[in-house]
Amino acid sequence: MTMIRYTEDHEWIRTETDGTATVGITGYAQDALGDIVFVELPEVGRSVNRGDVVCVVESVKAAADVKMPIGGIVTAVNSALVDDPGTVNRDPMNEGWFIKVRPADPRATEALMGEAAYLALTGQ
């Protein structure tokens, strides 16, 4: 069973069945940014802590940092976003993911917001 949690900075994190976690930005975030034209991804193997800037997203409106919701080791990056950053606009919760991590603490996501709390935060 997968579990999706959210941050106040509009990142989402999905715990996968194999224990890894996938990170991206929410539909709310990509809508606020507008057309995304560039994504900078980290190196696989990088150790990250909660709150670290792990990716940079640039749009026609602004640039934004993607911060880590949890700590861990980057195990994969969505290199398809380098050639087609607009994927984040089209499908932010699936094909538009940024990185996969092996969590330092598998239960760390439990402290993040569930869907109802995130929807209340964004007024949706």
Image (cartoon, grey):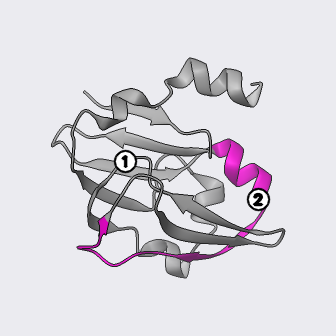
The question of residue 38 being in magenta is answered with: yes
Asked whether, in this view, residue 83 is left or right of residue 22, the answer is: right
Q: Nearer the viewer, residue 111 or 87?
A: 111
Q: Which residue is mark 1?
A: 70
| In the image, residue 91 above or below residue 43 | above
Residue 46, quarter of picture: bottom left
Q: Amino acid at mark 2?
A: Leu
Which residue is at the front of the view, 112 or 13? 112
Q: Nearer the viewer, residue 105 or 117?
A: 105
The question of residue 87 being in magenta is answered with: no
Residue at 69 percent of width and 21 percent of height = 120
Mark number for residue 88? none
Image quarter of residue 84:
bottom right
Where is 51 relative to 74, above or below? Answer: above
| Residue 88, image x, y percentages | 59, 59
Q: Which residue is at a point 79% across and 69% down the rendered structure image?
A: 62
- Residue that label 2 marks: 33
Tell me residue 49's x, y (percent): 36, 58
Q: Which quadrant holds residue 14?
A: top left
User: x%, y% of residue 111?
Assistant: 40, 29
Q: Residue at x 51, y 69 (%)?
A: 55
Q: In percent of the image, x 78 and y 51: which residue is there?
A: 32
Question: What's drawn in magenta, residue-wise?
Answer: 27-47
Residue 51: x, y in percent? 48, 54
Give the spatial CA distance, label 1 vs label 2: 23 Å
